[in-house]
Image: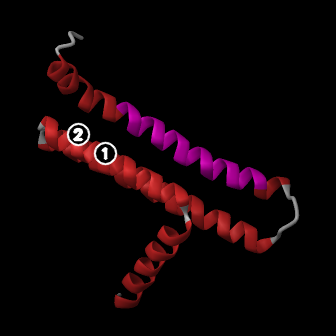
Amino acid sequence: MVQAFKAAFRGLRAAWSEERHLKIHTLAILGVSLAAGYLGVSRTEWALLVLCFGLVTGLEYANSALERLANRVTTERDPWIRDAKDMAAAAVLVASMAAAAVGLLVLGPPLAELLGIRL
């Protein structure tokens, strides 16, 4: 079990050091977290946000792993590998769009109230 955790943490470090999109997602998580803290969202809303953070980040790690593996299998153009990589990227995109919608639903009303905007 300890070895499994060591391998997972090694994967976190490897991806973090080489995957730019993980850094972008992390900045988005930080920004949303700061806004949610400032706006005083409920525990349930925090739970939804954290679930979205984990979903998008987890899919980004899986996408990065698939891309590395595919690039190792062959450097030649292969339509099957291209499609697999594109589908993995699409999974991250779909999760990111859903997370953005959750973010708007959670943060939009208190932010509008703070700014004096009627919804």
Query: Which residue is at 72% across, 67% downward?
Result: 70
| Mark 1 → mark 2, Cα distance in angstroms | 6 Å
- Tell whether label 2 touches label 1 (CB within 8 Å): yes
Q: Which residues are magenta?
A: 82-101
Q: Amino acid at mark 2?
A: Ala
Query: Which residue is at 58% across, 58% downward?
Result: 63
Q: Which secondary structure class fits the magenta region best?
A: helix
Residue 35: numbered disc = 2
Check the image and report above or below for 52 versus 17. Answer: above
Residue annotated with mark 1? 31
Query: Which residue is at 59% across, 67% downward?
Result: 65
Quick check: 59 left or right of 104?
A: right
User: How far from the left and from the top, in percent, is residue 102?
Assistant: 33, 34
Q: Amino acid at mark 1?
A: Gly
Task: Say whether residue 98 is magenta.
Answer: yes
In the image as oriented, which residue stretches furthest toward the top? 118
Quick check: 71 left or right of 62?
A: right
User: How far from the left and from the top, in percent, is residue 62?
Assistant: 54, 62
User: How far from the left and from the top, in percent, is residue 2?
Assistant: 34, 89
Quarter of the image with the N terminus in it:
bottom left
